[in-house]
Amino acid sequence: MQREKSKGKKKVVLAYSGGLDTSVIIHWLIEQYQCEVVAFCADLGQGEDLAAIADKAKRTGAGKVVVADLKAVFARNYIFPMLRANALYEGSYLLGTAIARPIIAKKQMEVAKAEKAFAVSHGATGKGNDQVRFEMAYQAFDPTIKIIAPWREWGLTGRSELIAYAKRYHIPVEATLEKPYSIDRNLFHVSYEGGVLEDPWVAPPDSMYTLTASPEATPDVPCIIDIGYEEGNPVSISGRRYAPAQLIMKLNAIGAIHGIGRVDMVENRYIGIKSRGVYETPGGTILHVAHRGVESLTLDREVLHLRDSFIVPYTSLIYNGYWFSPERALLQGLIDAAQTGVTGTARLKLYKGTAQLIGRKSPRSLYRPKVSTFEKDTVYVPKDAEGFIRLNALRLRHLNRNGLGTTEKT
Ligand code: ARG
């Protein structure tokens, strides 16, 4: 009905998920802006029926629906570069939601351009990181685009009001009032926020998890897998080659059986709020450990340490929405330049929720058994160490002689 009314009008491209919020937004945009809504559905491997979602967008009033399968590009050009950098926010979060926003926004802007839309819109609330990530990216691609963030504009305040709105305008939604969590899912992870998780002392109920088995319910026999790397990128699992998206999905399946990759944390959102988040990233967790394993053999010490000093700033850029920034590109270039020799294989033991590195090998290994051995070797002259230590201790000896030595009492 709205579709007929809105045809031929100015267009808004909405990042549409098929959920309650973005369904209400379709209707709200048409009413508020007298526009035609183009619903953009990104397939990032969230495991939903995209054809059904597209159909629902139409029934809700969208004039057009664009569905894009972005799984391969998402894995190759977003997740893999992030994994090459060992990115981990606040020591725990593998950034599964943060890395999805820039690719959605980029493709959405391509649709906006093709459709000659005057505006883009999204369903992120006014309190989170996602609004920042979407809108930073939109503006990087078109400084003149109008951005409509309904959650910051409309008077609707909560879920029950949204459901009432949907009822009033006959918007097809399956949602019930007791939706327990805010969930975001793609091929890399699942995240949960809200509901009982808002009390950081309350343990996540086991029924909440969708990917991973609880460690108590995993096999009593460990699983040993080999991850092969070429120039910093994982290319194979136990000798079999996979394309990036398939490799992640395969590792998700293996890791899930062994309860790998659950994280429960209180994190700092960019906008200044602390938030409790729970994540499942089985494949990503395995790849994080495996990559470190191959790097430990193949990276020069000073290159490794210097690169490590950039991980925190690099991670913040992704978390805070600066994927399409010159500083992220700069750091990515530096990090990737160090990856050319990161070729080899990591062996992991998956067991009861842990992914443990138990072996690593590489044709580019810098590890020299002859030098590292505790047995007699011919290359390294232990006597040299005496002078090395004496010169490094020169300052300490000097301070002590001047009565300025260590204040350590015990
Ligand atoms: N806290 C995480 C982040 O900021 C996950 C956000 C999940 N989003 C959601 N709609 N539930 O990256």
Image (spheres, helix red, strand yellow):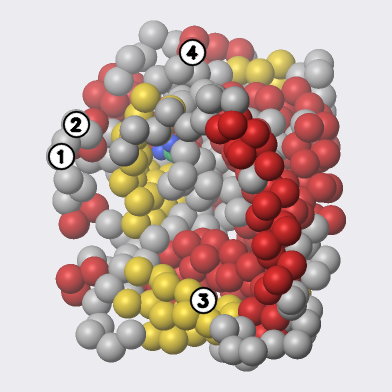
The amino acid pointed to by label 1 is Val
At x 23%, y 53%, the residue is 208
Q: With respect to residue 245, does 29 lie above or below? A: above
The C terminus sits in image quarter: top left
- The tally of labels here is 4
Kindly indicate the quadrant of the structure image that contains residue 23: top left
Q: How far apart, in angstroms, are the residues tagged by discs 3 and 4?
A: 39 Å
The amino acid pointed to by label 2 is Asp
Drawn side of residue 98 relative to residue 409, left or right = right
Q: How far apart, in angstroms, are the residues tagged by discs 3 and 1?
A: 32 Å
Q: Please state which of the two labelled residues, at mark 1 or mark 4, is closer to the viewer.
A: 1
At x 78%, y 27%, the residue is 140
Q: How far apart, in angstroms, are the residues tagged by discs 3 and 2?
A: 34 Å
Q: Secondary structure at mark 2?
A: loop
Ligand 1's quadrant is top left
Q: What mark, if any, has residue 199 been given in the picture?
A: 2
Q: Secondary structure at mark 1?
A: loop
Q: What mark, if any, has residue 250 been given in the picture?
A: 3
For label 4, the residue is: 152
For label 1, the residue is: 202
The amino acid pointed to by label 3 is Lys
The spot of residue 86 in percent (x, y) is 61, 54
Q: Which numbered disc flags the more N-terminal residue, 1 or 4?
A: 4
Q: Secondary structure at mark 3?
A: helix
